[in-house]
Image: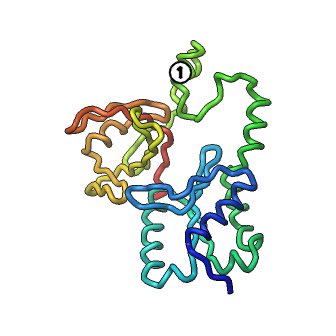
Amino acid sequence: MQVCRKDTFEVEVALELVRKGFRVIPQFDVAGRRIDLVVEGGHARLAVECDGDEWHGADRYEEDMQRQRILERCGWEFFRVRASQFYSGKQTALNRLWNMLNERGIHPQLSKEFTEDKKTQMSDQQRPVSSGNVAAQKTGTAELNKPMGDTKVEVGDTVVYVSIESPQNEKQALITRERSNPEWGTVNIDAPIAQAFLGARVGDTVEAKLPMGSMHLLIKKIRKSSV
């Protein structure tokens, strides 16, 4: 049986995804914890956890599963692959991953970009999704300045957002009536960030008045509670 370091195993799984053209983010930070790999595409993402057979003992596995269950309640979906299965046969081990990505509308970037270029042929309509308001200012098109959907943030929703000051650092907050827990990204309804998000839509920029000063936050996604 082949034995390898966990970080080497993660790299090999990531390479299989990249070879097929998927966008992969390694060591994705969520509320102070890290997901091994996150695959993004369209309006969806999938967490991929790489379980090294030597590195994962029973205690660590249970800790990982507890973290996974909490993140699933926040709207995350997971695919787990064990090193022994991967090295026994990569295609067999990853077949379900390809199916899960396809079912969620997560497709290789090259094919997606080709399709979108054929549809638009307009450079100032290239995106991330969250740039709708900026694009509207550039083009002067009032239609683009409309909210990106009628769904508003409510209690129980998970909001994916970025700070205007640090747009590369994506975060998420689960709006709850329970006590805030920064470790898991839950925010009480009375907290300033929750108050700023409630009633807002995807594409809105809201102002959260925090003790250290105001922050301007751009809402990228709203994940509705499944409960």
Query: Who's the residue at 61% across and 77% down the image?
Result: 4
Looking at the picture, how far across and down is residue 225, in whole percent? 46, 53
Between 2 and 171, the residue placed more toward the observer is 2
Between 127 and 5, the residue placed more toward the observer is 5
Quarter of the rendering occupied by the N terminus? bottom right
Looking at the rendered structure, the kind of residue marked 1 is Asn
The outermost residue toward the bottom is: 1
Between 19 and 118, the residue placed more toward the observer is 19
Q: How is the image coloured?
A: rainbow
Would you identify the image quadrant in which residue 159 lies?
Answer: top left
Would you identify the image quadrant in which residue 9 lies?
Answer: bottom right
- Total numbered badges shown on the rendered structure: 1
Q: Residues within 10 Å of mark 1 (few under 14, many from 20)?
A: some
Determine whether the residue tagged by mark 1 lies in a helix, strand or loop: helix
- Per the image, the residue denoted by label 1 is 145
Query: Who's the residue at 36% across and 49% down the image?
Result: 175
- Tell me if residue 59 comes above or below residue 12 in the rendering: below
- Tell me if residue 52 comes above or below residue 29 in the rendering: below
110 relative to 135 in the view: left or right: right
Looking at the picture, how far across and down is residue 147, in whole percent? 51, 28
Query: Who's the residue at 53% across and 16% down the image?
Result: 137
Looking at the picture, how far across and down is residue 99, in whole percent? 72, 61
The outermost residue toward the left is: 211
Looking at the picture, how far across and down is residue 95, in whole percent? 74, 67
Query: Who's the residue at 66% across and 53% down the image?
Result: 104
